[in-house]
Image: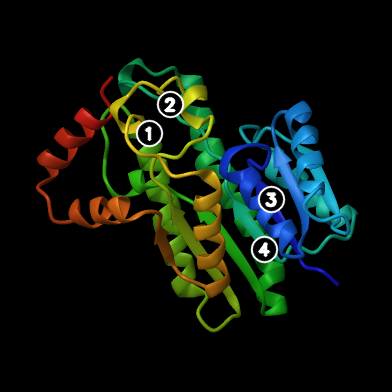
Amino acid sequence: MNKTVLITGASSGIGLEFSKLFVRNGYNLIMVSQNEKNLEKAKRLVCMENDNAKIYAIAKNLAEPSAADEIFEYTKKNSIQIDVLVNNAGIQVYGKFYENKMDDLINLMYVNMVALTKLTRLFIDGMVKRREGKILNVASTGAFQPCPMNAAYCASKGYVLYLSEGMGAELKGTGVTVTALCPGATKTNFAKRANIEDIKLFRGRLLDPNRVAEIGYEALIKGESVVVTGLYNKLVAESVRFMPRKLVTKIGMNVMGR
């Protein structure tokens, strides 16, 4: 029987490219996304990659506290074993923290951290018992440093990165691996939805989402712990470790400026 992968944020961008890639490689697929109309459209696109794959679509807003539990119950009710979990969904809140709306910040925390944590905790039990499974958590190059005008987002991605590395170490010898994918700025609608298309970060060369998905997929299959996409992003992620913190935040303010 084909293995099954569950992907959040699967209707566009990197998530859609992940969906195509996994189905192309023989996996059955559960696509999770908030917008039902976009999700069904994406499902039709993914079906073209492999007519024999079983593809399920679940429309859920991961900012809702019950969303992760409802997704898990759906898989139990339909007797679907999740062999690979890809926590790809994420949202952005741009601007000065003290000017951000409280609801926007709470939604960011639920989508980027709480839903990811709950889904991982719910599905990892089965993986450990079967002594086989893979988890891919999409973090960001922003996970490596604090960033003004992007404070909550980078903090949430730092959580994803450190959670992934910590879990990965705990899971040694269990047959289950955890990979943190850290993309830089990518050609998706992510920036448009967050209203940050015109900031300096998105004016340079951007990686295509299909390439980001390929890098993440390869790292997941190999069981790598952390992978940063692109040479420039790797250099930045490593260099900030050695910079004075005041300089790091100063550079961050400049990069996130309009």
Asked whether 98 or 90 is in front, the reply is: 90
- Give x and y (percent) for residue 135: 59, 62
Of marks 1 and 2, the one in the foreground: 2
- Give x and y (percent) for residue 106: 50, 29
Of marks 3 and 2, the one in the foreground: 3
Q: Secondary structure at mark 3?
A: helix
Give the CA separation, mark 4 to mark 2. 29 Å
Say whether marks 1 and 2 touch (CB < 8 Å). yes
Q: Which residue is mark 2?
A: 93
Of marks 1 and 4, the one in the foreground: 4
Of marks 4 and 3, the one in the foreground: 3
Asked if 7 appears above or below 156 in the picture, the reply is: below
Task: For label 3, count other residues whose C-alpha is less than 10 Å away and answer few (under 14), some (14-19) or many (20+).
Answer: many
Which of the 4 image quadrants contains residue 27? bottom right
Q: Which mark is residue 19?
A: 3
Give the CA separation, mark 4 to mark 3. 12 Å
The residue positioned 72% from the left and 78% from the top of the image is: 130
Give the CA separation, mark 1 to mark 4. 28 Å
Asked if 186 appears above or below 20 in the picture, the reply is: above
Q: Secondary structure at mark 2?
A: loop
